[in-house]
Image (spheres, rainbow, N blue to C red):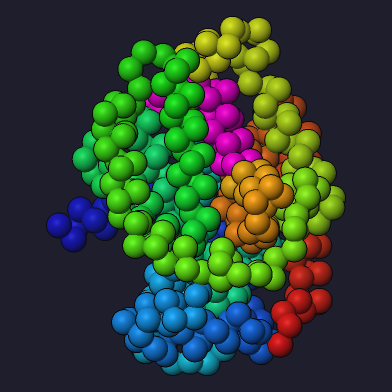
Amino acid sequence: MLQVGLSILLRFLKDNALIFPLFLLGLALRIYNLDSQGLWFDEAYSYKMSRLGLVGIVKAIVAESENHPPIYYWILHLWTSILGYSEFSLRLLSALTGSLCIPLIYLIGKMMFNRTVALLAALMLAMSSYQIYYSQEARSYILMVFLALLSYYFFIRLIERCSFRRSLGYLLSGVVMLYTHFYGVLIIVAQNAYYLTRLVIGPGPSVPPLRKWIMMQLILVGSVLPQIYLLMGSSALTGDFWIPKPNLNMIAGSLLEFSGSWPLFILFLLLCLWSIINARELKRGASFRELFTSVRGYSTGLNMSNIGRVYLLSLLILVPIVLPVVLSIFYKPLYQAKYAIPASIALYLLAAKGIDNIRRREAKLFVAALVLALSVVSVHHYYGNPEKHE
């Protein structure tokens, strides 16, 4: 059994040799200066919660009307019981989790498109000052990114072929994500929006079948009923919360934060638009129904058309941002860009696809080098300008 596992690992490393250096790069950037700043208020709260024990954490969430679910605090409690409560060890959990997001986004990019897109998206994530910031913070946001990536992965595998293992992986990643941050529900909403679109206009029977899909969604809803109960008593819903009322400009502002700088924001936006308009089905003037029935251009067995893949990524970007912004305008302010951080992953994938769509090799290399150079500038600015309020 051990030989089989080692054989699979060695074969993966041989076929995907460049992802390991990218992982090490991302890890180094996330560990560098990890304890150079003191804990700010929210991190100090994480420290306090991690010392309460598994049951004590739940009691504190109820008693203090805490807005965050218990999973991250539980994991941090177990982590610090082994490594201690220094600033470095408190943040190291997030640094390692953020680094593990790099091979995960690579797997998703390779599965959806090709190795070039996968490597470019992994590079963008590894070099993202925004991702580095939250990978150096003792809070739950980067864990939510990791779990959202797992949820993306199993969702796409289910679209490819429905099986018990894939369904179980999708459910487990979804439940843990929902118990990590309440905004995880928006990832599930975006996935359902894509599935329902396929169901209405897609090619024949949907994968997974409608009955199994409904059962999985009911399991997800049922599993988080205790979390819904806790959320209803949270200060974000029951009292005057500190978040200011947003406006529609916050949608672009969130994408700007995900990008890391104005030049990267403009470049990513152009690359995303190029991904959309360059889809083959759009270029050849296919009908609306045909957009989701044509599968061409990729060696993978993934049962998704070119525009279907771009459409899924667009939903994963927009739903976690637009829906809560609109709700915050008309109901109660509940939106912060960091809550929608999983949307940044889809942004990197769509921008990477835009680079891959550039036909001339020289132009493609130039744009990739430009993204790398601007990312280096953004990371350098991040390290030189501490932003945590001690």
Q: Is residue 272 above or below residue 387?
A: above
Across and down, in percent, residue 135 comes to 58, 70
In the image, residue 317 lies in the stretch drawn in magenta: yes
Left or right: 297, with 386 as reference point: left
Q: Does residue 377 appear left or right of residue 39 in this picture?
A: right
x, y percent for residue 270: 78, 36
Span shown in magenta: 300-319
In this view, 337 is above or below 45: above
Q: Quadrant of residue 54?
A: bottom left
Residue 271 in view in this figure: yes
219 or 266: nearer the eye? 219
Q: Which residue shows up at 69% across the image and 71% down it?
A: 242
Q: How many marks?
A: 0
Dominant secondary structure (helix, strand or loop) of the stretch shown in magenta: helix
Question: Residue at (73%, 36%) from the top-left corner?
Answer: 271
Q: Position of residue 363 (x, y in %)?
A: 78, 34
Q: Quadrant of the N terminus?
A: bottom left
The answer to whether residue 325 is seen in the rendering is no
The image quarter in which residue 216 lies: top left
In the depicted structure, whether residue 103 falls above or below residue 59: above
Q: Is residue 286 magenta?
A: no
Work out which residue is located at the far left of the displayed protein and give it. 1
Q: Quadrant of the C terminus?
A: bottom right
Task: Name the residue: 71% across, 49% down.
Answer: 329
94, 378: nearer the viewer = 94
- Coordinates of residue 149 in the picture (x, y in percent): 47, 51
The residue at the point 49 percent across, 80 percent down is 64
